Image: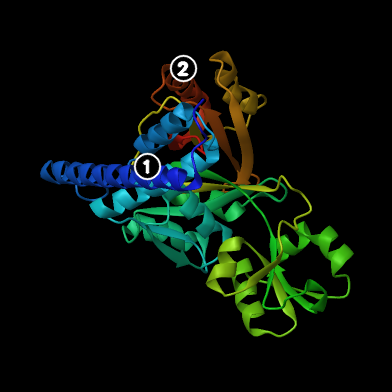
Amino acid sequence: MAADPTLAQLRAQIDAIDDRILDLLNQRARCAQQVAETKTRSGEDDCFYRPEREAEVLRRVAANNPGPLSREAVVRFFREVMSECLALEKPLAVAFLGPEGTFTQQAAYKHFGHAVQAVPLPAIDEIFRAVESGNCQFGVVPVENSTEGVITHTLDSFVQSPLLIAGEVVLRIHHNLLSRLDDFTLVRKVYSHQQSLAQCRAWLDRYLPGAERIAVSSNAEAAHLASGTPDSAAIAGEVAAGLYDLGILERNIEDDPNNTTRFLVIGRNPVGPTGCDKTSLLVSTRNYPGALYNTLEPFARFQLSMSKIESRPSRRGAWDYVFFIDVEGHRDDHPLAEALKELEKDVSMLKILGSYPRAVG
């Protein structure tokens, strides 16, 4: 009967595996550089990032993962590998809703990896302008929260913008109590965005009922203030703790453990199909009985699942509305292409905001 391996033998085995992983990683990086050279010779040099290709790679490795590593861990690892390889080809500039340390920055890193030039901008419309002008290849904007609803500034920006949706990010929002104090019972002021204060109300009522709650423009700003204010703390994400040299006194203090925010990735170019896609539409209907029914009927007839509908004032006249619709499938898929042809006959305006891979990981 063979003896169990010793600790030294196991460590030697791990070292040998690490060397093989390192060699394979650099082989992959060299292949990525060759891809860039091939694309450059063919005249393609603006942006080497392809959302559909990345989504396919991540889904394939997640499906082929035998464990014991979790699906999420494998996706996170390969996303960072692809991010570093892409940076060798040509670094991406990605605009996000700043300042640094926001959940939007966290969403940008989740989607693109950390090897990007993350550009903080103070407003959603400035993110759209940065991508439209070409100063950034992509932008990341919040679009809806599971407890607070839609972000209207993002929806309204699509009405006039020529940009397309290139992807989506679904981020579980975990609020942490950050401070330079060692004990949360010493906290006398709590800084955070108004929504975050509301989302942590029950925890604050229970554990810090006497602390003053101060609403500020962002959770990143809250972390900045807490870093320089005695007896204070901030409610913010984990990224902000590292940026502003704060300790995490308590993790996950949000009242709803399922609190989730969806973000959209915006860019200038259409995205090809992956077989697991979503399409977002902007629709304006004529004002007659049954108009909305006729708008939605083609989706049911072609057995297409509609995951979202939201109305917004069109700003073209009083009581005139546009509808934002998310439907499963890619615009090039036959059922959706046929449904869109039918839809176009019964609406006054149809704008396809983009077909893009559904969120991975």
Instruction: Answer left or right for 219 relative to 182.
Output: left
- The residue lying toward the viewer, choosing from 258 and 333, is 258
Residue, x 50% and y 35% (percent of image)?
358
- Mark 2 vs 1, N-terminal side: 1
* Res. 39 image quadrant: top left
Q: Residues within 10 Å of mark 2 (few under 14, many from 20)?
A: some
Instruction: Answer left or right for 290 relative to 105.
Output: right
Residue, x 53% and y 38% (percent of image)?
69
**229 to 87, vertically: above or below:** below
* Res. 275 image quadrant: top left
Check disc 1 and report its element: helix, strand or loop. Answer: helix
Q: Where is residue 307 shown, x and y percent of the image?
A: 61, 31
Decide if residue 268 is in sight here.
no
**283 to 86, vertically: above or below:** above
- The residue lying toward the viewer, choosing from 347 and 317, is 347
Which residue is identified by label 2? Answer: 335
In 3D space, how far apart are the residues under numbered discs 2 and 1 (Cα atoms)? 47 Å
Task: Count up the numbered dots.
Answer: 2
Residue lying farthest left?
41
Q: Where is residue 144 shown, x and y percent of the image?
A: 62, 47
Which label belongs to residue 17?
Answer: 1
Q: Residues within 10 Å of mark 1 (few under 14, many from 20)?
A: few
Q: Where is residue 95 shown, x and y percent of the image?
A: 43, 59
For badge 2, the amino acid type reads Pro
Question: Viewer-nearest of labels 2 and 1?
Answer: 1
Residue, x 51% and y 68% (percent of image)?
100
- The residue lying toward the viewer, choosing from 39 and 355, is 39
Query: Do the numbered discs 2 and 1 sit on residues whose CB atoms are within 8 Å?
Result: no
Decide if residue 135 is in sight here.
yes
Q: Where is residue 13 shown, x and y percent of the image?
A: 40, 42
